Amino acid sequence: MVAGCQTAGRGRFGRDWVSRKGGLWFSIVLRPEQSVRQATKLVFVASLAVAKVLHEKYGLRTETKWPNDVLVDGRKICGILVETKSSDTELVFAIMGIGINANVHSSTFIPASIKSTATSVQDELGRRVRLSSLLRAVLEELEILYDLFLSMDIQSILVRWKDFANFIGQEVTVAYHGETFCGTACDINEEGELVLSLKDGSIRQFHSGIVSMSE
């Protein structure tokens, strides 16, 4: 389903997602015959597809940010949300929601509190793009990567995803359940977890959290 705009868009942790006319906002319902835990890794399929298309088709310097964002020169251009419906331990379906700031000016539609951390395709290129062409390109890339996902080849997806992950090897701060952890982002493991080397020398894995670059 593709929406021209959303009146109640939301991101992770129930946060508001501003999605006005001019952006590309769409959701895909998927029914992979896999576990709920495996389905959560679809976020890497989606973000890799968007990063590749914006880089290869539009020449943008895209980056992937764990776990669900796509950036351009450190500023957010796309957010992704994957939600699942399960019965006991069986996956019923997964909804992959993708929001790309396309034909919008970040200075006018993005709240003042996050303007410095967001951008759009139009801002970066200095022109509008055809939304139907952008959607088609992302869907085509998604189909390729989703086939890999169905074949249980998540490692190949993660290897390509990490090619765009400029934060790996950098000092980051992870906010997790009311605590903050500072260290070096070492890797994203096969479970999709962020591997962090803490300042005391210990290693910790995070399956969720909010990552920011350390000052």
Image: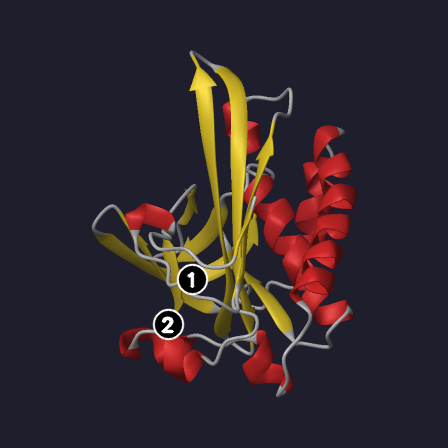
Task: Report whether residue 16 is seen.
Answer: yes
Q: Quadrant of residue 156?
A: top right
Return the disc, 2 or 1, that comes first in the chain's sequence. 1
- Across and down, in percent, residue 188 comes to 56, 49
User: Is the residue 142 above or below the residue 172 in the image?
Assistant: above
Q: Which amino acid, by three-letter code, is at mark 2?
A: Ser
Which colour scheme appears in the figure? Answer: secondary structure
SS at badge 2: loop
Q: Quadrant of residue 173?
A: bottom left
Q: Between tags 2 and 1, which lies in front?
A: 1
Please give the name of the residue rendered at 52% of the width and 36% of the height, measured from the top-left corner: 95
In this figure, which residue is indicated by the disc labeled 2? 214
Of residues 146 and 123, the one nearer the viewer is 123
User: Is the residue 187 above or below the residue 60 in the image?
Assistant: above
Please give the name of the residue rendered at 77% of the width and 69% of the height, measured from the top-left corner: 56
Position of residue 14 in the picture relative to residue 94 (left or right): left
Position of residue 154 in the picture relative to residue 99 (left or right): right
Q: Which mark is residue 19?
A: 1
C-alpha separation, residue under disc 2 versus residue under disc 1 = 29 Å
User: Is the residue 8 above or below the residue 191 in the image?
Assistant: below
